[in-house]
């Protein structure tokens, strides 16, 4: 940057940059579903054009549910909430969530704020940052189970969520690739006891190499 404001810490890490927004969480809470669906409505709409990032931390006591879809509610500039759906209709999704964007939302009457040339807020000292703790992009194929119709395929990626961590589920809102131009469901689950995060697909014949679908883990910083 040729002018503006920049803050660099002792490790030469840029903490604040007037040209580049940091990822901040806007709201957080808990979710609980009925009939295998959980719907969350934001207290205030997210006004970014880009879709917000949804992070969840499945309950450690009922973490066998497989999350097979995540749908954002609303539209660009007016995102009002999200909905997550479990793979098995007997599972009721429960856990914690937060929503994050690369922007800030002014919530205080004092502190420091930075604005871009277009007038949009890029930094607010009261907006809590999201710290990325791990990113995994390599999935290891574990095998499949034959069903009466199709099969269930599964892969593992890295580890399970550590204490206080959440995982972004946006990347698991689209189907897994299958052979012959078809597609299969894509679900994700967190096995705390086995220390594994698993991706699941139900299809006739799936590609065993699912490429580099990223798994992003993060924590909130107060």
Image (tube, grey):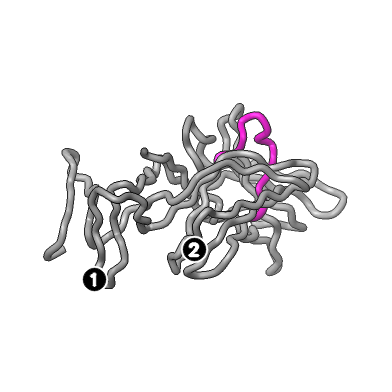
Q: Is residue 61 magenta?
A: yes
Residue 105 lies left or right of residue 196; in this view the side is left
Q: CA distance from mark 1 to mark 2?
A: 22 Å
* Residue under the image location 22 percent in, 49 percent down: 14
Q: Is 102 placed left or right of 142 in the picture?
A: left
Of residues 133 and 54, the one nearer the viewer is: 54
Q: Which residue is mark 2?
A: 51
Q: Is residue 212 visible?
A: no
Q: Nearer the viewer, mark 1 or mark 2?
A: 1
Query: Is the residue under label 2 in contact with that under label 1 (CB below 8 Å)?
Result: no
Residue shown at 60% from the left, 58% from the top: 173
Farthest residue in the top direction?
193
Answer yes or no: is residue 164 visible: yes
For label 1, the residue is 117
- Going by the picture, which residue comes out furthest to the front? 109
Please say if 192 is above or below 171: above
Question: Quarter of the image holding residue 181?
Answer: bottom right
- Whether residue 11 appears in magenta in the rendering, the answer is no
Residue 47 in percent (x, y) is at 45, 65
Is 150 in front, or is 53? 53
* Element under disc 2: loop
In which quadrant will I find the N terminus? bottom left
Number of on-image labels: 2
Residue visible at 29% across and 52% down in the picture: 124
Looking at the image, which residue sits at the far bottom?
118
Q: Horizontal and vertical percent for residue 20?
A: 27, 60
> Residue 157, how many percent across, how many down?
54, 42
Quarter of the image for the C terminus: give it.
Answer: top left
Q: Earlier in the sequence, mark 1 or mark 2?
A: 2
- Which segment did they paint magenta? 57-69
């Amino acid at each position: 940057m040729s002018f503006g404001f920049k803050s660099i810490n002792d490790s030469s890490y840029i903490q604040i940059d007037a040209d580049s927004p940091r990822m901040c969480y806007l709201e957080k809470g808990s979710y609980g579903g009925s009939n295998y669906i959980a719907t969350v409505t934001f207290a205030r709409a997210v006004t970014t054009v880009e879709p917000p990032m949804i992070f969840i931390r499945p309950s450690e006591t009922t973490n066998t549910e497989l999350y097979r879809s995540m749908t954002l509610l609303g539209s660009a500039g007016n995102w009002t909430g999200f909905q997550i759906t479990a793979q098995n209709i007997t599972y009721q999704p429960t856990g914690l969530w937060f929503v994050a964007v690369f922007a800030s939302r002014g919530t205080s009457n004092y502190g420091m704020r930075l604005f871009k040339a277009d007038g949009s807020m890029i930094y607010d000292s009261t907006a809590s940052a999201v710290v990325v703790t791990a990113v995994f992009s390599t999935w290891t194929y574990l095998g499949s189970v034959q069903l009466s119709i199709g099969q269930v395929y599964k892969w593992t990626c890295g580890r399970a969520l550590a204490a206080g961590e959440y995982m972004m589920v946006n990347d698991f809102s689209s189907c897994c690739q299958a052979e012959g131009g078809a597609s299969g469901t894509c679900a994700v689950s967190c096995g705390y006891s086995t220390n594994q995060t698993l991706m699941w697909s139900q299809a006739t014949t799936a590609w065993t190499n699912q490429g580099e679908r990223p798994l992003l883990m993060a924590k909130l910083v107060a």
